[in-house]
Image (tube, helix red, strand yellow):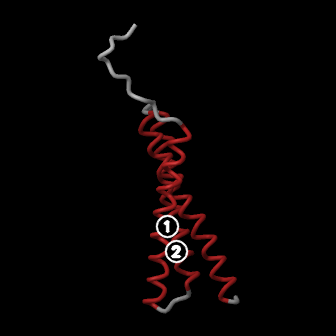
Amino acid sequence: MTPAHERVEPTITLRETLCRVALEGLARAVLVLVACMIMSAATGYDLRLSFQAAVLAFSLLGAIALERGLKAERSRTYAQAANFYAVALTNYFICYASIVAGDLAGTLGGH
């Protein structure tokens, strides 16, 4: 029996964690897509090239985070591994958003 004055910290559920990752990924993806549009407008290059560069960059960052998460899991630091997995998911979310935006830009651009 626990004393009445002792507080029990609530645990974060998987659903809450995935919701946080999705919201953070959405916010960052919007920032990246806006940055791609600004870069494309400033340089005069095709918008799809900016989106392709974002796909390449964030897929590499996601792969690095995933590798570090696996390494942390092998060394039994599970909290650190979970953080790296969340970062990998966020980077892959940005990657997929850039792919969809690039396809949409190609469709709307008539190419």
Residue that appears at 50% across and 65% down: 29
Give x and y (percent) for residue 77: 42, 33
Q: Is residue 15 left or right of residue 6?
A: right
Task: Using the image, tell me which numbered label, if any, was put on residue 84.
Answer: none
**Is residue 9 depicted above or below 54 in this figure?**
above
**Local secondary structure at mark 1:** helix
Q: Residues within 10 Å of mark 2 (few under 14, many from 20)?
A: some
Q: Is residue 28 left or right of residue 15?
A: left
Q: Which residue is mark 1?
A: 57
**Looking at the image, do the residues carrying marks 1 and 2 touch, with CB atoms under 8 Å apart?**
yes
Q: Quadrant of the C terminus?
A: bottom right
Q: Amino acid at mark 1?
A: Ala
Q: Amino acid at mark 2?
A: Ala
- Nearer the observer, 69 or 26: 26
Give x and y (percent) for residue 100: 64, 70
Residue that appears at 47% across and 56% down: 24
- Nearer the observer, 90 or 65: 90
- Nearer the observer, 93 or 84: 93
**Is residue 82 depicted above or below 92 in this figure?**
above
Q: Is residue 107 left or right of residue 38?
A: right
Give x and y (percent) for residue 14: 54, 38
Q: Which residue is mark 2?
A: 53
Residue that appears at 52% across and 79% down: 50
Give x and y (percent) for residue 64: 48, 54
**Local secondary structure at mark 2:** helix
